[in-house]
Image (cartoon, grey):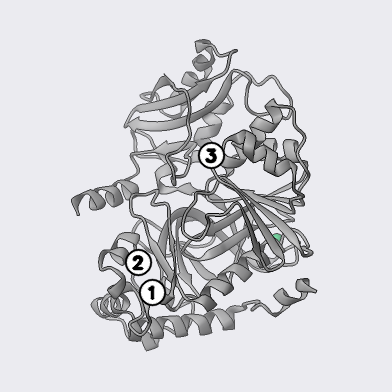
Amino acid sequence: MISGWTRFLPRKNKKDVDRSIRYIVSSAYKNVPFYRKSFNEAGIDPSSIRSIEDLPQLPITTRLNLMAGGPTEYLRRDIYPEQLTIRHTTGTTGTPVTIYMNKMEEAFRRITLIDAFRRNISLTFPMTLVDVGPERKDLATQIFKRMGPITIVRLFRTMPIEQQIKILMNIKPTIIKGRPSAHWELANALREKKIVPPVPRLMLSGAEMLFPHVRTLMENVFRCRVADYYNCEEIGNLAWECPANPGLMHPNTATGWIEVVDKQGNVVPAGIEGHLIVTNLFNHSMPFIRYELGDRVTMMDPRPCRCGFNGPVMRLTEGRNENFIVLPDGREITPRLMFEVVNSAFPHDMPGWSMIEAIRTFQIIQEANDLVVVKVVPDPAYSESLWHAVEKNIRTLHPAMRLEIVIVEDLKPEPGKKFHQVLGKLNTRWKSELSNQENK
Ligand SMILES: [Zn+2]
């Protein structure tokens, strides 16, 4: 019955996307002071923006610029803010963003999220969606919530892990979603306590980079498919992991249009990694046009895919600007590679298990030009000698790089913040955003 309704969702082809872009650009120019000013300053005639090919003429919108003028600047003039739903981003990069949408836009956002689940499994209703590790905020404050045929169960990050496990053991989850760091904590606790949890149809990961060791642990403990999703507060679902090609993602052309640009803001050709900017195709209350999210991706040439999707393809998020390590000679190292440099040096003793018993968890932070600090939560088998091989590996990146180990009790992120397995504090784009924030 319900599986029928997503049939009517817009399966956007290029013509539809072009039409949405024409509409959102002209309506933003007419009704939203921020975009009127920004297009005027850039000397843009909005009626000349007819299709995705014309988009690069428009200026890039940063969080900071958009938020600076307040709601009177970034919201449509003819709406009442008090009638809109409000969401907040975590502000990982120092600039939290407030997102407004009306009831229709909110409903569309929700339906497209469920539609994105359906790209990885066929859904039947009623279903139970378990959310692991959310904050109590905005609209999410109750543990159990019914939303039509969907029961949402929230295992809040502030709940003791024993309580989370108790709730989980008493339900039959269809989908378990959450950040990799929250999945890691729950799965690790289940493994340690030798508790076998109920098997969901799908484990869904998002918001942080999904490293292979976390995916492996999730698969082992929950015995089901794990799929990475690219969701954000500003858009909802932006892309889902292709069920036929793990590691590749299909951008959701119903919700947003993605472009990839270089440091100067020029669009890069397919196959080249760059900064992701997105145009929200459905939110007219608060438009996001060529909005920089801070993530890095590689777009590939569109082609019909084995999974049946015929549209854009991109390589999984390589991480955010702040996750890149910058070597003394200016070369940038992706967080995936940096993680491998450290992790591959450990003496792995368990097959199919990519973390070692001696270490509970660790975090790699670039503290200076030539200094990498690894924060580590040790387990009983821990020994300092573990780091000799890691040190050697790090020197192969650049001979001047040094390694420092700091033992800590816990590596949980602050409330509302994401966990960064690899944090490269020297990235210029991130630094400029932070310093702008501090200068304000
Ligand atoms: Zn596919």
Instruction: Decide which of tag 3 and tag 1 comes sooner along the chain.
Output: 1
Task: Identify the secondary structure beneath mark 2.
Answer: loop
Q: Amino acid at mark 1?
A: Glu
Left or right of 264? Residue 176 is right
> Upstream in the sequence, badge 3 or badge 2?
2
Give the image location of residue 3, x and y in percent: 77, 71
Residue at disc 1, secondary structure: helix
Of 167 and 22, nearer the camera is 167
Other residues around mark 2 within 10 Å, as few (<14) / some (14–19) / many (≥20): many
Looking at the rendered image, the quarter that the C terminus falls into is: bottom left
Q: Amino acid at mark 2?
A: Thr
Q: CA distance from mark 3 to mark 1?
A: 43 Å
Residue underneath mark 3: 336
Residue tagged 1: 82
Q: Which residue is mark 2?
A: 61
> In which quadrant of the rendered view does residue 159 lie?
top right
Residue 211 percent coordinates (x, y) = 59, 40
Look at 63% across and 20% down and name the residue there: 357
- Dot 3 alpha-carbon crowd within 10 angstroms: few under 14, some 14 to 19, many 20 or more: some
Identity, as a three-letter code, of the amino acid under mark 3? Arg
